[in-house]
Image: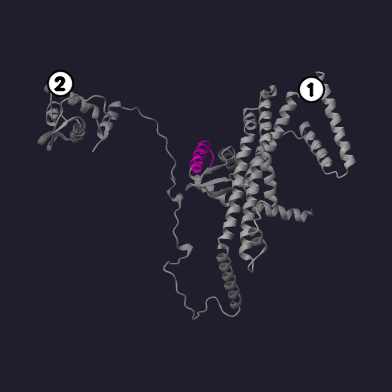
Amino acid sequence: MSVLRAALEASRLQESDPAWALLRARNAPVAIAILEKQLGGEARRVAAPVLFERIEDDLEELRSHGFDLPQTAQQYCAEWRSAGVLIRRAAEGAREETLELSQGALTAIRFASQLSAPRASVTESRLATVIERLRALARDTDPDIGSRLSALQVERGRLDAQIERVAAGNVDVLASEHASERLRDILALVEEVPADFARVRSELEGLNRDLREKLIDQEGSRGAVLDDIFLGVDLLASSDAGRSFAGFYALLLDPERGIEFEESVQDVLGRDFMDTVTGQQAKSLRRILPTLQDRSSEIHGVMTAFSRSLRRFVQSQDFLEDRLINRELRSALRLALDTSDTVKPYARTALMLDLSSVPLDSVAALSLNNPGDFAASAQVVAHAPEAVDIEQLRELARASDIDMEELSENVNAALAELSAATIADVLALRPATQGVASVVGLLVLAEEFARPLDGREDVIWESSRGTARRGTVGRHLFTAPIGGRPGRRPGP
């Protein structure tokens, strides 16, 4: 590649690639830290309201340590979504939209993590992996039967010699430093898988969109894409991305391979060298297979949904309506282009259009809600805590709630003296300490614990200012003590 082509390619990526956009953002360190924490772990897709709340907590923590972050979580997420760092999708079976990292964002986060914790530049295990893969590639692509048979015999001889050494008790156990080195290389390969899944999903979405555009743009009654769909060809599954993923998915769901993988993981977790690795690395090793299965099942579901949707789009003949609309729009644009040479855009014409009842206004005329208008501009002033007066708290509680416990004790005290008492009797012996609220509370207790009588009776209480008040309530007779400890009720 020439230097000019390389420079033009880099310029294009600088303007369009989400990974580049994230790394060159003004708050790139903060963005990478937040996005890796919230969307880089096992939870790869989070509902938008939940994510906003979590990011807002992170922003508050960062602001308290001197970071200048004036915008809200929603505003930062909107910026990241516009830059292609976040992908917004509709959640199935829910009203909330979900947000997840794009392939470029995963690439940028992985790049930053490699800078903070770089792997050794040259390791024995990586070299051994390269040699083994190159040997397998040369053997599996060799069409010569003789040389291929010779290579297999050499491999069998090496295995036979190794079996003899193990049978004789000569076992070479990998040293702890080499074992942990191989484990880190394995986990490094696994870390690249989420970005691969994001890339496959992006390719499937683009392919699905291209197929629909071809169905609409094709002229004539039939076309290549339409014929394939009517013949039952799954165009998404037969694409390069679909075939590659199908092979990966079939291998991952193979029961025998799955059991072998799980047994290998358990064996490795029980080895002595695991004491030299971090807890996060051990957790990542334990979660490799479930994570791969979950993510691959999601991609498989997306591919299946796209294939079914495309088939329904064709079988229901909806594409014919879209094709007709597309044809009419192209015809109108073509006529407008031809007319623009002779008729000015502002020239009056005799054509009259009947508008619908829906008013048509410019988007610029809309007044959008700006959450930033309600953001607090003044600095928050921290005040030293003052001593709390428990009596004041009790008065505040009594002012807002009816003390049902006190009223129950008043009823029981009246019954101890009179054996049976009405509400007026209770108030005569125990005045209403909360004014009309005490009267209301006694009525509530009477409805539950007292026997209703005919007629009405007068009750007397004092207001909060000491003014005598009188009212009339229905007669109820308390005959038995009120058990339990009724709680407080909201005041009237």
Q: Where is residue 363 in the image (x, y as percent from the top left)?
A: 48, 62
Q: How crowded is mark 1: few (under 14 residues within 10 Å), some or many (20 or more)?
A: few
Q: Is the magenta stretch mostly helix, strand or loop?
A: helix
Color scheme of the displayed model: one colour
Residue 464 lies, in percent from the top left, at: 18, 35
Let me know if residue 111 appears in the view: no
Which residue is painted at 76% across and 56% down in the image? 4
Residue positioned most to the right: 146
**Disc 1 element:** loop
Q: Give the range drawn in magenta.
A: 50-69
Above or below: residue 187 compared with residue 75? above
Task: Tell me the crowding category of disc 2: few under 14, some 14 to 19, or many 20 or more residues within 10 angstroms, Cα based.
Answer: few
Q: Give the residue at x 15% y 26%.
A: 479
Q: Which of 257 and 23 is in front in this view?
A: 257
Snapshot quadrant of residue 465: top left
Residue lying at the far front of the rendered structure: 231
Determine the CA span between mark 2 and mark 1: 91 Å
The image quadrant that residue 264 belongs to is top right
Quarter-of-image position of residue 138: top right
Q: Does the magenta stretch include residue 33?
A: no
Q: Residue 172 carries which label?
A: 1
Q: Give the residue at mark 2.
A: 416
* Left or right of 166, for residue 395: left
Image quadrant in which the C terminus is located: top left
Which tag, 2 or 1, sits closer to the chain's start?
1
What mark, if any, has residue 357 been given in the picture? none
Q: Are marks 2 and 1 in contact (CB under 8 Å)?
A: no
Identified by mark 2, the residue type is Ala
